[in-house]
Amino acid sequence: MTVPFPATQPGPWTAAAMIAAVVLTSTTGEVLTAAAMKSIGDLDEIRAVSGMKGAIRAVVTCPLFFAGVGFLALAFFSLLFALNHLNLSLVAPASASLTLVTNAIAGKFFLKENVDRRRWTAAVLVCIGVYLLAH
């Protein structure tokens, strides 16, 4: 069985835009979902007081949670689109590793997480690896 593949690959700017769409929608979805879970509180405590239905109700009534799920769905379809036009050997490592970098940045600035020097060093090394992969 032959897998059809476009005769020409998109240019580097188009490829970068496709990967950026995956990374940015994924990071936005993950940040919104994390913010939702932090705003809800400890689900074990909610479940102890209100039962499983109460814990589920706490999650499904949180607008941030659904916004996060929506962005994660966009990230999934952006990934499908990118895989339709680009090589898996570029899209998968680039989007996964750059998402690690943007999650560290977003965690630091939007969620006020403590991102230590080791994580920043890892993020820089990931950027170097993505650069080497793309060239």
Image: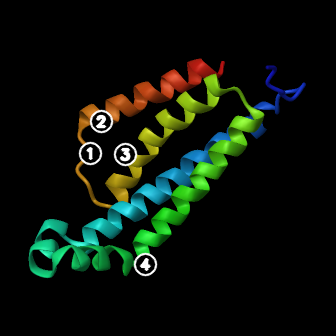
What is the residue that sits farthest to the right in this orientation?
7
The residue at the point 20 percent across, 71 percent down is 41
Circle 4 crowding by C-alpha within 10 Å: few under 14, some 14–19, many from 20:
few
The residue at the point 59 percent across, 50 percent down is 76
User: Is the residue under label 3 in contact with that under label 1 (CB below 8 Å)?
Assistant: yes
Check disc 3 and give the amino acid type: Ala
The colour mode here is rainbow
The residue at the point 81 percent across, 20 percent down is 2
- Measuring from the top left, give residue 118's x and y in whole percent: 25, 32
Q: Give the residue number, with chain letter if any, for mark 4.
A: 63
Check disc 4 and give the amino acid type: Pro
Eye-nearest disc, 4 or 1: 4
Does residue 64 lie above or below 125 as drawn?
Answer: below
User: Is the residue under label 2 in contact with that under label 1 (CB below 8 Å)?
Assistant: yes
Sequence-wise first label, 3 or 2: 3
Check disc 1 and give the amino acid type: Val
C-alpha distance separating marks 2 and 4: 30 Å
- Measuring from the top left, give residue 11's x and y in whole percent: 81, 32
C-alpha distance separating marks 1 and 3: 7 Å
* Observer able to see residue 17: no
What mark, if any, has residue 119 been given in the picture?
2
Question: Which image quarter: residue 25?
Answer: bottom right
Q: Give the residue number, with chain letter if any, for mark 1.
A: 115
User: Is the residue under label 1 in contact with that under label 4 (CB below 8 Å)?
Assistant: no
Check disc 2 and give the amino acid type: Arg
Disc 3, SS? helix
What mark, if any, has residue 104 been given in the picture?
3
**Position of 114 compared to 13: left or right?**
left
Disc 2, SS? helix
